[in-house]
Image (spheres, rainbow, N blue to C red):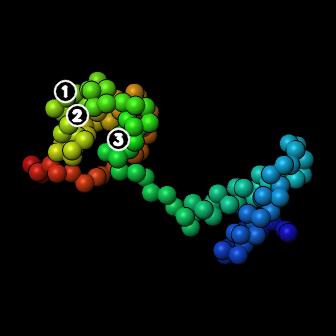
Amino acid sequence: MEIRPIRTQADYQEVLREIESLFEAAENTPEYDRLDILSTLVESYEKTHFPIELPDPIEAIRYYMDTRGWSRRDLEPCIGSRARVSEVLSRKRTLTLEMIRKLNQVLGIPAEILIQPYESAQIPA
């Protein structure tokens, strides 16, 4: 198979089969180079045809808490008082820039996720 752009689902499936056959390719071989190029083509095709939306900021915070075994109290250094944490997690208060910075630094949540607009119960001023 010659290397060409992936334009159809059939092309995509064909390239995936070839990639699977090249998984065991040794580094610094023509097969490994082919695997690298085909993988790059697949990544580009998937970004265009199967985009993954960023998670909701509050759901991301909850996920990071769950995976680390954190309680609401553990968020206080990032968000503020116990009441403030409750307000944020219940969507009664939106995240501030300072909260976003701290959540990014402490929990490692990408700022790109935290700065997105999200559903809030907060009444506009």
Report if the CB atoms under discs 3 and 2 are less than 8 Å apart. no
Report if the CB atoms under discs 1 and 2 are less than 8 Å apart. yes
Residue 41, given in percent of the width and then of the height, sits at 70, 60
Query: Helix or strand or loop: what does disc 3 sit on?
Result: helix
Query: Distance between the Cα atoms at labels 3 and 2?
Result: 11 Å
Q: Decide which of tag 3 and tag 1 comes sooner along the chain.
A: 3
Q: Which residue is mark 3?
A: 62
Query: Distance between the Cα atoms at labels 3 and 1?
Result: 17 Å
Q: Residue at x 57, y 60 (%)?
A: 47
Figure quadrant of residue 106: top left
- Residue with the most extreme left position: 125
Residue type (three-letter) at the residue carrying disc 3: Arg
Q: Residue at x 77, y 64 (%)?
A: 17
Residue type (three-letter) at the residue carrying disc 1: Ser
Q: Which residue is mark 2?
A: 85
Residue 109 appears anywhere in the view? yes
Query: Distance between the Cα atoms at labels 1 and 2?
Result: 6 Å
In this view, 108 is above or below 94 = above
In this view, 6 is above or below 125 = below
Q: Residue at x 85, y 69 (%)?
A: 1
Report if the CB atoms under discs 3 and 1 are less than 8 Å apart. no
Q: Give the total number of marks visible in the rendering.
A: 3
Residue type (three-letter) at the residue carrying disc 2: Val
Nearer the observer: mark 3 or 1; the answer is: 3
Residue 31, given in percent of the width and then of the height, sits at 88, 53
In this view, 112 is above or below 5 = above
Q: Which residue is mark 1?
A: 81
Query: Helix or strand or loop: what does disc 2 sit on?
Result: helix
Q: Nearer the viewer, residue 60 or 28?
A: 60
In the displayed structure, does residue 119 sit left or right of residue 101?
left
Q: Residue at x 28, y 52 (%)?
A: 118
